[in-house]
Image: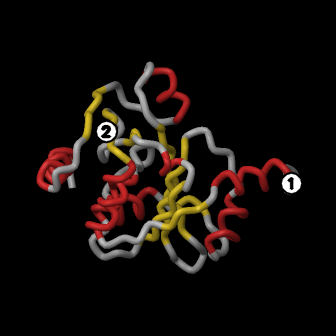
Amino acid sequence: MTESDLLAFLDREGIAYTLHRHPPLHTVEESRELRGDLPGAHCKNMFLKSKAGEMVLVTCEEGRSIRIRDLEKRIGLRKLSFAKPDLLLDRLGVTPGAVTPLAILNDTEGTVRVVLDEQMMRAEVLNCHPLHNEATVAISTADLARIFDLSGHAAELVDFDELERAAVEAPGK
């Protein structure tokens, strides 16, 4: 799926969005510097793979500080690590630096598990990439949940406040 395909999908499904163009962004820090006062929550995304081959797309608020080992325990997987770029491109159709919850639309086989920051999903608007890192799409979190439903993915909400507390309470582990 390209950005044009994505926007056509959103239009076809009656999903409102605002598109903001900008120079390529590769990190949360770059995003913070260039976005100005763009309203809404801003996400960071991780595409992870377990040693057993299970794939997980994790989307949380950009400022979250968690340990992957705590996330593993919470979602019942072992030995998660960042997936290789070729697997990311094959499964979600995006490259590193452009990972987005909207890429789940490219997982037509339903092989990727979706984990979302429960607190982030309480925001009215979420800002994320439209399958590349040269723009940002602002979309309601209710519509994002609808996109997961339309794609056949059951998004799992995780209490990231709890994961952050665990990281703070045991920083040396």
Q: Position of residue 96 (x, y in %)?
A: 44, 48
**Amino acid, disc 1:** Ala
Q: Secondary structure at mark 1?
A: loop
Q: Position of residue 106 (x, y in %)?
A: 28, 62
Vertical order, 145 against 124 (above or below): below
Mark sitting earlier along the chain (2/1)? 2
Vertical order, 126 against 173 (above or below): above
In this picture, residue 25 sits left or right of residue 116: left
Farthest residue to the bottom: give it: 52
Q: Position of residue 67 (x, y in %)?
A: 71, 55
**Residue 158 position by quadrant:** bottom right
Q: Which mark is residue 114?
A: none
Q: Please give the residue where the numbered disc 1 appears in the rendered image.
A: 170
For disc 2, the neighbor class at 10 Å (few under 14, some 14 to 19, many from 20) is many
In this picture, residue 47 sits left or right of residue 16: right
Q: Please give the residue where the numbered disc 2 appears in the rendered image.
A: 137
